[in-house]
Image (tube, rainbow, N blue to C red):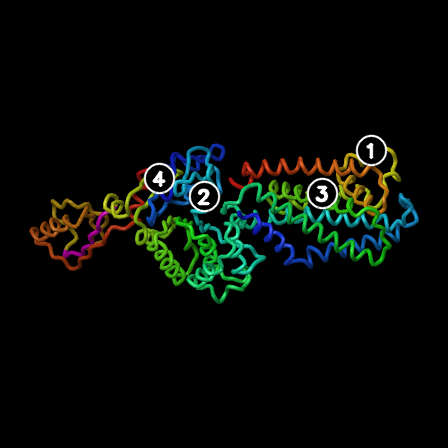
């Protein structure tokens, strides 16, 4: 099976600093894959190695089976990258920018597709405007459009919603989801964990240049997080014999951690048995932030 | 077909969009040189080949403009792309190091030649020019613009900030062009400086280019062309090796 992206023991050293340390991962075709980690974890470096912007010190990277160094032409044709920085060329209009980008990929009669991207990214009104005059959000859309001009099967978005307003973020995700439904593989790095949790099928967590967790979003949530049971009781003391650990207490309010929903029944049973009255009750589902913090603490 | 034609077109369009600054301004500067130097030196600087000082000066000014603008194009485009980060648009597509080199150098040649043609056209209004051998003129214009286009590419690859390009321009390109015989025949210099001038590759480019106009030169034109060609070959080899290795461009 050909992976959309595959890295094998990729290392990147800058002097003594090891920005990437034997990173091996596979992104399947059609997947929505998340690359998460704190600042400096190596996410952008890893993307740069895959995109050919940075040469790995060791290891190999492939895009749709094509080695990013030995067969860089094929690898780069298969890949669209939305860079993290809001970069643009101040000499050109939006349409010129997209035509040039298309031409760099050897596509010179691509106006129908360029029009379509302009339309889908809501850039029609700004198509003839110089890049300098665009707002940050609009410039971000042009970056997405530039990554799509050559219809790549694999699209990498490096923090695409950083500093972007809510409306644009929603619009952008609708569009990216559609691309994913149409068969494009999406790789995403983001600081917004709720975004990753909602969108990604699988997630790799990076820390200090190493992959410290890699699993489906659902498995990560089940393994590293759990449900939080919020209770307000009629007293400030919990009965003895409760299995669930207490995360915090504020007067008569308690937060308990549950491994799964089955554990809820035994907690409620024990409270009833002890004659404790429940004034309020709330069950919070697992969340990725919790997973993130716990994985980062461990490593 | 790869990305070369588009990158070449973009590099040309880039300077053409600001042609007031990149073409009109250097033409005006050359005209000012002509006015000032022709007034100040017309009686003092002996011109070889029995031509007037202004007819001697104009080919030098034209070549100086070609050289300086060819250098400015590739160096400023690269450093601007590196500093602002938009170099990524050229590095992400499947453009080979050879295509990148060819696009930047050719666009630099176009700018150098356009400015040179502009200077020639404007100065020809004021000076009676001879065209002894147009083929030499074309040959040296092409080689000169190519040498400086390649040198500009190298400077752009090497530099990390605008200051460094400005320093290169002010401390290397400008002294080498000024001291290459644009304004005088090196035979009017003391012997030591005549020898020193022979170490300046720009001297050969200007001397040979001028030969095409006035039919006289300080050095045999074929030998000058060979020096230009050799300089171009060396600079190109270094530039291609750096581009292939990804030096300062691909982390």
Residue A189: image tag: none
SS of the residue under disc 2: helix
Distance from the alpha carbon under mark 4 to that under mark 1: 63 Å
Front-lying residue, B68 or A246: B68
> From the viewer's perspective, is B218 left or right of B28?
right
Distance from the alpha carbon under mark 2 to that under mark 1: 53 Å
Residue matched to label 2: A74
SS of the residue under disc 1: helix
Distance from the alpha carbon under mark 4 to that under mark 3: 50 Å
Distance from the alpha carbon under mark 2 to that under mark 3: 35 Å
Magenta stretch, main secondary structure, is: strand
Front-lying residue, A274 or B111: B111
> From the viewer's perspective, is B66 left or right of A254?
right
Tag 4 or tag 2, which sits nearer the N-term?
Answer: 4
SS of the residue under disc 4: strand
In the image, the segment drawn in magenta is A225-234
Residue B72 pos. (x, y %): 67, 48
Q: Residues within 10 Å of mark 3 (few under 14, many from 20)?
A: many
Q: Residues within 10 Å of mark 4 (few under 14, many from 20)?
A: some
Chain under callout 4: A
* Count of labels in the image: 4
Residue matched to label 4: A25
SS of the residue under disc 3: helix
Residue matched to label 3: B143
Res. B232 image quadrant = top right
Q: Which mark's residue is nearer the viewer, 2 or 1?
A: 2
> From the viewer's perspective, is B112 left or right of A117?
right
Residue matched to label 1: B195
Chain under callout 2: A
* Residue A254 among those drawn in magenta: no
Tag 3 or tag 1, which sits nearer the N-term?
Answer: 3
């Amino acid at each position: 099976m050909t992976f959309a992206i595959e890295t094998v023991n990729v290392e990147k050293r800058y002097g003594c600093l090891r920005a990437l340390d034997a990173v091996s991962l596979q992104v399947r075709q059609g997947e929505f894959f998340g690359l998460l980690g704190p600042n400096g974890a190596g996410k952008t470096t890893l993307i740069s190695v895959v995109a050919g912007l940075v040469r790995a010190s060791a290891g190999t990277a492939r895009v749709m089976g094509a080695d990013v160094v030995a067969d860089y032409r094929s690898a780069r044709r298969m890949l669209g990258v939305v860079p993290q920085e809001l970069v643009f060329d101040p000499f050109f209009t939006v349409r010129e920018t997209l035509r040039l980008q298309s031409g760099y990929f050897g596509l010179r009669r691509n106006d129908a597709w360029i029009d379509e991207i302009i339309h889908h990214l809501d850039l029609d009104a700004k198509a003839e405007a110089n890049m300098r005059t665009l707002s940050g959000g609009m410039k971000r859309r042009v970056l997405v459009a530039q990554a799509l001009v050559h219809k790549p099967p694999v699209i990498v978005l490096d923090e695409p919603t950083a500093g972007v307003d809510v409306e644009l973020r929603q619009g952008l995700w609708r569009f990216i989801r559609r691309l994913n439904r149409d068969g494009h593989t999406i790789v995403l790095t983001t600081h917004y964990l709720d975004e990753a949790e909602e969108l990604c099928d699988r997630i790799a967590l990076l820390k200090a240049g190493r992959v410290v967790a890699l699993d489906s979003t659902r498995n990560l949530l089940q393994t590293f997080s759990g449900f939080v049971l919020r209770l307000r009781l009629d007293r400030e003391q919990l009965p003895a014999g409760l299995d669930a650990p207490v995360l915090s207490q504020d007067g008569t309010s308690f937060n308990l951690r549950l491994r799964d929903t089955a554990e809820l029944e035994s907690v409620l049973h024990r409270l009833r048995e002890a004659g404790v009255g429940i004034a309020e009750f709330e069950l919070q589902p697992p969340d990725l932030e919790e997973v993130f913090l716990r994985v980062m603490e461990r490593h | 077909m790869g990305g070369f034609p588009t990158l070449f077109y973009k590099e040309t369009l880039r300077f053409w969009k600001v042609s007031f600054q990149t073409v009109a301004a250097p033409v005006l500067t050359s005209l000012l040189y002509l006015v000032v130097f022709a007034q100040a030196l017309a009686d003092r600087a002996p011109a070889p080949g029995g031509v007037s000082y202004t007819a001697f000066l104009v080919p030098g000014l034209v070549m100086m403009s070609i050289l300086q603008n060819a250098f400015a194009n590739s160096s400023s485009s690269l450093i601007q792309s590196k500093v602002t980060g938009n170099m990524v648009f050229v590095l992400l597509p499947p453009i080979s190091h050879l295509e990148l080199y060819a696009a930047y150098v050719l666009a630099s040649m176009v700018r150098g030649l356009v400015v040179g043609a502009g200077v020639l056209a404007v100065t020809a209004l004021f000076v009676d020019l001879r065209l002894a051998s147009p083929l030499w003129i074309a040959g040296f214009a092409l080689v000169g613009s190519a040498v400086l286009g390649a040198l500009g590419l190298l400077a752009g690859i090497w530099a990390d900030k605008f200051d460094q390009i400005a320093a290169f321009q002010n401390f290397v390109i400008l002294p080498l062009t000024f001291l290459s015989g644009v304004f005088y025949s090196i035979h009017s210099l003391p012997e030591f400086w005549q020898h020193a001038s022979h170490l300046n590759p720009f001297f050969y480019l200007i001397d040979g280019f001028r030969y095409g106009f006035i039919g006289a030169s300080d050095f045999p034109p074929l030998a000058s062309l060979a020096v230009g060609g050799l300089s171009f070959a060396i600079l190109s080899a270094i530039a291609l090796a750096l581009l292939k290795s990804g030096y300062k461009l691909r982390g």
